[in-house]
Amino acid sequence: MHEDCCSWYNMFMINRITDSADIQWECVFRQVLAAPVHDEFQVPKIGIPHPIDQGFRSATDYPKGALAQYSCKTLDGGRIHIREYETYFVVHRDWGDPDSGLGGLITHLINDSPEVLVGV
């Protein structure tokens, strides 16, 4: 397993779910992985653990009005990206992880955030 992957992603990949918090995020994760890249899912904050408590790291990206952002690198080099708002999270999958080095940043800029390149 890749070291940067968050704990519930690792548990999902090896089929070891340990508690209800993992199951909640695992359900979100299944939906995100089954959907096309960039499809967004709104997740109410009530009753689900905070992403930091589940192994996500703080992330940088275009804020889109979010209070904070978190990410988890996936085994394919992409990431699960979460934006935190007042009462909910918005979750989607990206092709690249801009926090994982130059290759991830370039992949992210070209495939996930081309609007940033246009502004450069």
Image (cartoon, rainbow, N blue to C red):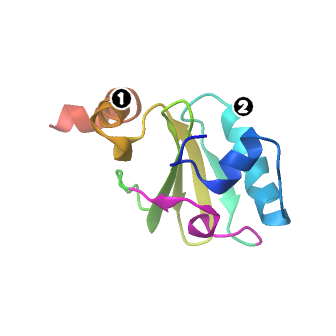
**CA neighbours of label 1 inside 10 A, class few (<14), some (14 to 19), many (20+):** some
Image mark for residue 34? 2
Between circles 1 and 2, the one closer to the viewer is: 1
The numbered disc on residue 81 is none
Badge 1 is on which residue?
Answer: 107
Is 112 on the left or on the right of 43, as rendered?
left
Give the answer, above or below, for where 117 lies relative to 85.
Answer: above
Q: Position of residue 72 (x, y in %)?
A: 53, 50
Image quadrant where one finds the N terminus: top right
Q: Secondary structure at mark 1?
A: helix
- Residue 83, compared with residue 53, is above or below; it is above
Inspect the image, locate mark 2, and give the three-letter code of the amino acid beneath it.
Ala
Q: Nearer the viewer, residue 120 or 101?
A: 101
Q: Position of residue 22 (x, y in %)?
A: 77, 59
Q: Where is residue 53, by image quadrant?
A: bottom right
Q: Taking 21 as reference, is 91 above or below it?
A: above
